[in-house]
Amino acid sequence: MVPSSPSGEPLSTTFGMADVTVRITTAERQAGEMAGEKAARIKELFREHGVVLIDCPCPIVPIEDLEVMGRQLDLQAALALAHGVLDTGMQRGDGSSTRQRPGISTQVRGIHASGLPRHAAWVKPGVVANPIIEQTVAACLGDGAFANTFGTIANFPGSETQVLHMVRPFLSPSLSAPYGAGSRQDGTWWKTTAAEAAAVGHPWPYRAHAAMVSFGCDDVTHENGASEFWPGSHWDTAPATTHKPRDPAGHVAALVAGAERRRGHSPPIQLTCPKGSFYIRDDRCWHRGVGNRADRPRHLITMGYRSAEVRPDLVIGGTMLRNRSTPEELEKAATESGWDDTFVRFHPDCRDALCAEPSRWGVDRNCGFREDVLIPSIDPRLQLDSRGEVVTEAALPPMPEGLRGVPWVERVYERGRRARV
């Protein structure tokens, strides 16, 4: 029997994560530098397939950091449910959908953007200044690559399937969710024709201008909603001229048609990732979030990077491209976070995590420090308590009846009970 994604899409039986995995040694991890041939292999796989998993016998991303981040994200997820700002489908367990239809939003029940507090307790050098991650980014995006986003995605039990998309889901302002509103998005292709690519000395399709590094706070598995990913789809230039905000139906239709073309020879895989490992993917590659069939949320940390070449065209903090936008659109453009900074904003207490050791691979961490790190696109109750402090487990409101008997929620509430004692 051919395995299927939770979306109902048949998965590849001849291609999988093993085909896009580069395994580094414990010695390389400890030294913070992988062998040159491995970096070259990552670059090759990234160009060919659009995704690479970097694995190691020991954790590349420190397990203790993942535990701290995962605990906070579980708390925020429980708060979101208790405050009623999410409809996850978790209580009904009916999250399901199959192949997408053109023209529908990628904002679906149970898959939501979120964000960690931009404070030192949750911004760790083993994450935001990890030398193996930065060596990987430099290999894939070239000299002068810079950090552009820092976020998280929660996939709740009973979630639905998104439509196929590139970069992040597109949303109109009316569809913004209080747990994590989506930002305005453009067509995701920096250059739209072979002539445009040639003008900047690129092949066609052009070299990657944007990549996302992702990893889970736990193992990312088929069971807990590992994203469906279409390897090599960044070579399909048909969607290059589409524009998501202006013509969402046309954009999705281009991907639907592309999926039909690719289904027979390059079906999708699921992006699984062991805890402590990470993967990097080209933002142009097609993917979608799928149903979480486990009994707890799966939290994915996401860090966006861009190539030096695209910097003048990019509205920092999102994917909005100046060369794809009208002046009116740029005037209204919101960054992914809801801030209008020209850098990725962190609290000053994160300075040591981000600045103590410069990137040995020349990656610009592009960080700026502000006292105000309340993310406008996320419900304030999920970020600050009544005293204006970062929310803790002691701040949980009474548990709604509908959440009683949900093991992961009860664990969060039990930690909150102990914190109040």
Image (cartoon, helix red, strand yellow):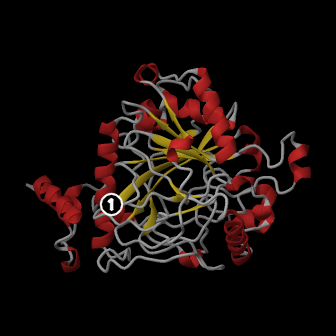
Across and down, in percent, residue 39 comes to 60, 28
Q: Is residue 297 above or below residue 373?
A: below
Across and down, in percent, residue 243 comes to 75, 68
Q: Is residue 145 above or below residue 296?
A: above
- Find disc 1 in the rendering and name its residue: 76
Q: Residue furthest front?
A: 1
Closer-to-camera residue (80/272):
272
Q: Is 156 situated left or right of 213 in this image? A: left
Across and down, in percent, residue 135 comes to 57, 29
x 49%, y 77%: residue: 97
Q: Is 90 situated left or right of 52 in this image? A: left
In the rendered image, is residue 337 in sight?
no
x 37%, y 74%: residue: 88
Where is residue 202, by image quadrant? top right
Q: Is residue 71 above or below residue 248?
A: above
Quick one: SS at disc 1?
Answer: helix
**Residue type pointed to by label 1:** Gln
In the rendered image, is residue 93 in sight?
yes
Closer-to-camera residue (2/298):
2
Where is residue 157, by image quadrant? bottom left
Across and down, in percent, residue 49 comes to 65, 47
